[in-house]
Amino acid sequence: MDVLVPTLATRSNLALSYYHLGRIEEALRLQREVYTGWQILSLSSQLREAVGDCLTISVGNLTEILIAAREFEEAQSLAREKLPEIIDRHGPDDILTLEVRTWYARALFRADGASEDDVAEALTILEDVLRRSKRVLGDSHPDTERARKFLEEVRSARADAAEES
C-alpha cells in the first residue's frame, strides 16, 4: 500500500499528461491500468475509505479519456455503473460527482448515432450540473464553465436538428 498509492497517483498524472499532449491511446491504456489498481485497492475493507476519492477521480479521468478516444459506449457504461456509488459517497453537489455527471452527459451527446432520448438526457443532466456548479463552485469556476460550454453544444445541436427536420 505504501508504494502502490503514490505509484497509482503518479501513473494517473502521466496518463493525463499523455491525454493533454494528444497521445490518447497511451493515455487510455495507462488510465485503464490506474482505474483497475484503484478498484483492486478499494476491495479491501481497510482501504475502501482511504482510496474512495482516488477511485472516483479515476472514474472521471477514464471517462474523459474514453470520450477523447471515441469509446462512447464504454464511457457511458462506466459512468452509469459508478454514478450511484459516487453520489452515495460524495453527495449530488460534490465536485467529483458533478465532474463524472458532466462527462457522462458528454458521452451520451457525442456518441455516434446518439438517439433523441440520449440527447435529451444529456441536456437534463447538464442543466442540473450547471445549476449545481454555479451554486457550489461559482459562476466562473472552470468546471462550471465546462458544463456551460457542453450545455450550449447540446442546445445548439438540438436547434440545428430541429431546423433540418
Image (tube, grey):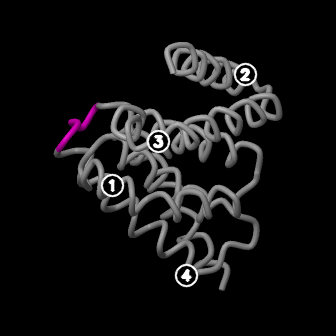
Q: Position of residue 68 (x, y in %)?
A: 71, 43
Tell me the distance, in whole angstroms, between the alpha carbons under discs 3 and 4. Answer: 38 Å
Q: Image quadrant of residue 107? A: bottom right
Query: Going from the N terminus, do you reach mark 2 or mark 1 first?
Result: 2
**In the image, what residue type sits under mark 1?**
Val
Tell me the distance, in whole angstroms, between the alpha carbons under discs 2 and 1. Answer: 27 Å
Which residue carries the number 4 mark?
A: 117
Tell me the distance, in whole angstroms, between the alpha carbons under discs 4 and 1. Answer: 18 Å
Which residue carries the number 2 mark?
A: 18
Q: Is residue 105 visible?
A: no
**In the image, what residue type sits under mark 4?**
Asp
Which residue carries the number 3 mark?
A: 44
Closer mark to the observer between disc 3 and disc 2: 3
Of all residues, the one furthest to the left in this rendering is: 135
Q: Image quadrant of residue 134? A: top left
Tell me the distance, in whole angstroms, between the alpha carbons under discs 4 and 2. Answer: 33 Å
**In the image, what residue type sits under mark 2?**
Tyr
Q: Image quadrant of residue 164? A: bottom right
33 or 116, which is in the foreground? Answer: 33
Q: Position of residue 91 (x, y in %)?
A: 24, 53
Query: Going from the N terminus, do you reach mark 4 or mark 1 first?
Result: 4
**In the image, what residue type sits under mark 3?**
Ser
Query: Going from the N terminus, do you reach mark 1 or mark 3 first?
Result: 3
Which quadrant: the C terminus? bottom right
Query: Going from the N terminus, do you reach mark 3 or mark 4 first?
Result: 3
Tell me the distance, in whole angstroms, between the alpha carbons under discs 3 and 2. Answer: 30 Å
Which residue carries the number 1 mark?
A: 129
Q: Is label 3 in contact with label 4 (beta carbons under 8 Å)?
A: no
Tell me the distance, in whole angstroms, between the alpha carbons under discs 1 and 3. Answer: 32 Å
Q: Which element type, helix, strand or loop, lies under badge 4?
A: helix
Which segment did they paint magenta? Answer: 136-140
Q: Is label 4 in contact with label 2 (beta carbons under 8 Å)?
A: no
